[in-house]
Amino acid sequence: MAGPHGPLALLEYAVKKPVFNCQMCGQCVLHSTGMTCPMNCPKLLRNGPCGGVRPDGHCEVKPEMRCVWVKAVERAPKTPWAHELNDLRPPVDNRLWGTASWRNFLTKRDKQVPKGWRVEA
Amino acid sequence: MSRLEDALAAGRFVVTAELLTVNAGGLDAVRDRFEPYEDYVDATNATDNTAAHAHASALAVAIALKQLGMEPVMQLTCRDRNRLALEAEIAGAALHGVENICCLTGDDVTAGDEPEARRVFDLDSIQLLALCSSLARGTYLSGRTIDPAPRLFLGAVENPAAPPYDYRVERAWKKVRAGARFLQLQVGFEPQRLAAFMTEAVETGLATACALIPSICLVRAPSAFRYMDENVPGITVPSETIERCESAPDPEQACFDVACELAEHARSLPGVSGLHLISFRREAGIARLCQRLSIPTRSEREMSGYRRPVAV
């Protein structure tokens, strides 16, 4: 994770770190993943759980942690954005780490994808 | 068209195998590994640093397989390379006529013997599939043109036996939407999990949208089951299976019988397009399993248009 860049990012971090363990990727998808931050997955998976989830639903890499995707799949149906769970999320734009996802959302910077990225949503 | 794609398009039952890892020994070492089952398989997987242990690269092994007349499936994981390196691997593979690419997330570095390594995961397996689809359309991720576009036949892996169980088919659908045409399902020792996955796969049309190929693992000793259960992420071996093999008069035969039973069960499930066979030893276990299940050789399957026996 990257430290927050600038006052808005700092504010976002102060709000989201304690609640969601926000990693400041700058392209937040929390709402579509059951309010579970996928950037807490050690493999940074934004499109669903890997095949290594333990039988108790815990993480292959961090046995003490519940798989973020097990949580996401459980919680998403209870949110208003349930239909977004299976979106094909594009690769992370690594230039955005540490920036305020709130600003990137308003400016639609977080919607920019590489030209060759063409998939249905 | 790749031989694997051709067989699946024709509706024939396919058999793929996983090549034992290669570290040295030139092309002979590669040939030695697939020779015992060469006659039975449509394609052989070149693995990409399996279980996060370094070996000769999947690209190099896939090219070697191609040179030796064996159809390769190049596995590609997201653990060790960023998107630029992945694009280079795929374009490089296509340059040598390697068309089948199997996209995986990859075991974490902590599962391997160099756990201090940096993990990459710049993409996930679904993004990697979409990246491959982009290349197959003739552009790099940036949009820069590749002319002519490489011919690719894309696949991935899904694990019916890892939580969240009810979500696995949905995740497999994401892979299909990203471009997967075949899924080699992770090795499993709990037939009921595979059966549940396949039932949903048939109901939702997944089994027609892509080829579903369950994996069967052949081991020679019950200790290998125990090792997998304890150390391989995402694989559970029921204790009854292990105990049954341990207490058998001939444990090696018992282990083989377990594999045959699982293979027989997998093959009997509606929607299954073939089997992916994995053996941790060099012996002819894969060929023996095919013989036990009366699966004809590849050339016989091609001649007869062999489909799997349908239970009546």
Image (cartoon, coloured by chain):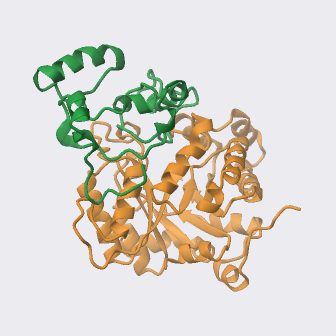
Residue B195 in picture, x, y percent from top left: 72, 47
Q: Which chain is green?
A: A
Residue A12 in picture, x, y percent from top left: 23, 20
Visible residue check, residue B181: yes
Q: Residue furthest right?
A: B312
Residue B262 in picture, x, y percent from top left: 72, 52
Foreground pick, B256 / B90: B90
* Tally of marks: 0
For image coordinates 38% across by 42% down, the residue present is B112
State left or right for residue A74 relative to residue A60. Answer: right
For image coordinates 45% across by 25% down, the residue present is A63
Q: Quadrant of the C terminus of chain B?
A: bottom right
For image coordinates 40% across by 28% down, the residue present is A31
Q: Quadrant of residue B311?
A: bottom right
Foreground pick, A75 / B300: A75
Q: Quadrant of residue B9?
A: bottom right
Visible residue check, residue B224: no
Foreground pick, A110 / B230: A110
State left or right for residue B17 relative to residue B251. Answer: left
State left or right for residue B296 relative to residue B224. Answer: right
Q: Give above or below for B265 relative to B7.
A: above
Q: Residue furthest bottom?
A: B303
Q: Give above or below for B306 relative to A10.
A: below
Q: Residue furthest left?
A: A6
Residue B102 in picture, x, y percent from top left: 45, 60
Q: Which chain is orange?
A: B
